[in-house]
Image (tube, grey):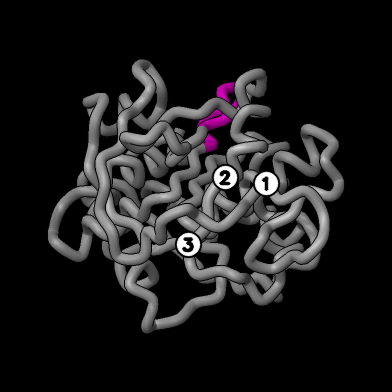
Amino acid sequence: MTPSLRIALVGDYNADVIAHQAIPLAIDDAAAVLELTVEYHWLPTQDIKSAEDLADYNAIWLVPASPYQNMEGALTAVRYARENSVPFLGTCGGFQHAIVEYARNVMGWQDAAHAETDTEGRMVIAPLTCSLVEKTDTIELRANTLIARAYGRDSIEEGYHCNYGISPEFAAELDVQPLRVTGWDDNGDIRAVELVTHPFFVATLFQHERNALAGRPAPLVQAFLHTAAQ
């Protein structure tokens, strides 16, 4: 019998959050296509005290709906996945906190901050010029990347529910980082990143998991599970 994949859904579950409704469907759909047995567990950020709390999982998804009850728990999950080559997917708030973790622990910006929750420090995550709450937009993908291969094309249309993104000042710093920008909107604003030194570390500001609510596949979720099964 094929052993089950264990996926940690890191975040503070709320049945009213549309993305939280969509994520189990997206995983179940992807698992069926890939013929995998997958168990997923909602792991509240307050329950993450150290990396040991994540050791039993094959993959980690830092889910939307921030601010998280325990930001340090969320950042611990990102760091554990990044440092241990554990497949990682971050969407919306997960994207934002993946950026904060990378800035602090890889780039040495100990004061890297998130404008939604912090009042001091260097704001790597700042308010968007235009809100993306319940908006849909076109995203151009960098060719020959994990995300472009998952979708099988270089331009996609996805939905958002967010008010924060990468600050313009920090965006320029990513030009020389292994955390590569792999998706932009029509204005050139960053909408997806992936860590090229990692088997699968992808974060998107958009919520591609919502496709499952309309009965459509979520290609990145399939790619995420496929890598976790390797």
Find residue 166 and name its label: 2
Q: Quadrant of residue 168?
A: top right
Going by the picture, which residue comes out furthest to the front?
129
Q: State the residue in front, 185 or 26.
A: 185
Eyeballing the image, is 10 above or below 180?
below
Residue receiving disc 1: 124
What kind of residue is marked 3? Asn
The residue shown at (62%, 51%) is 125
Magenta segment: 194-201
The picture places residue 120, in percent across and down from the top left corner, at 82, 60
The picture places residue 65, in percent across and down from the top left corner, at 50, 69
What is the spatial separation of the Cα atoms under label 3 and label 2, in whole angstroms?
A: 11 Å
Q: State the residue in front, 166 or 221.
A: 166
Pointer 1 local density, CA inside 10 Å: few below 14, some 14–19, many at least 20: many
What is the spatial separation of the Cα atoms under label 3 and label 1, in whole angstroms?
A: 14 Å
The residue shown at (37%, 83%) is 16
